[in-house]
Image (cartoon, rainbow, N blue to C red):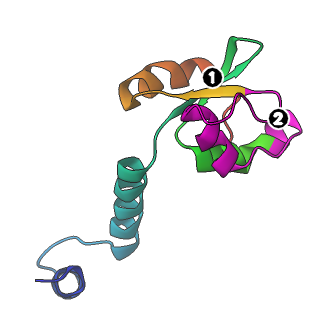
Amino acid sequence: MSVDVVSNYLKLAGEIGLCTYNQEHAKDLFKQTVAKRFSKPIMLFKDNVIINVFPSAIELDRCSMTMYGKHLMSQHISEVCRGERKQTGGFTMKYITYQEYEQLAPQFKQTIQN
């Protein structure tokens, strides 16, 4: 069965009281799963000092102007992480594992924008 067929059955079952199904919540969970599968967490450095961690290059791109006063483009961030560039916007970065991100993120909680 396709995802659409299953979604329609769950929605119908929820409407008639056979189960509890929230389509918006399911969409959010799906987006999070896809994002986690195709993105890589990043550690951000300035002058060889860790200054933050981000769940993805896109999230760093989105927050960079507000947080650092410079627009760090996700393509350039990825190039730095892959070793194709030395730095972008005066920052260096590297890919980290999800486990490392989960351990480090609480230390930088005040600086991470949602």
Residue 109 in the image, given as x and y percentages of width and height? 62, 27
Dot 2 amino acid type: Gly
Span shown in magenta: 65-91
Q: Residues within 10 Å of mark 1 (few under 14, many from 20)?
A: few
Q: Examine the structure image and report whether residue 87 is included in the region drawn in magenta.
A: yes
Asked if residue 111 can be seen in this view, the reply is yes
Q: Which mark is residue 108?
A: 1
Q: Quadrant of residue 28?
A: bottom left
Q: Is residue 110 visible from the viewing direction of this image?
A: no
Percent coordinates x, y for residue 80 in the rendering: 63, 34
The foreground one among 89 and 9 is 89
Q: Amino acid at mark 1?
A: Phe
In this image, 78 relative to 86: left or right? left
Give x and y (percent) for residue 4. Answer: 24, 85
User: Residue sitting at 73 percent across and 30 percent down?
Assistant: 87
Q: Relative to the observer, which residue lies in front, 67 or 92?
A: 92
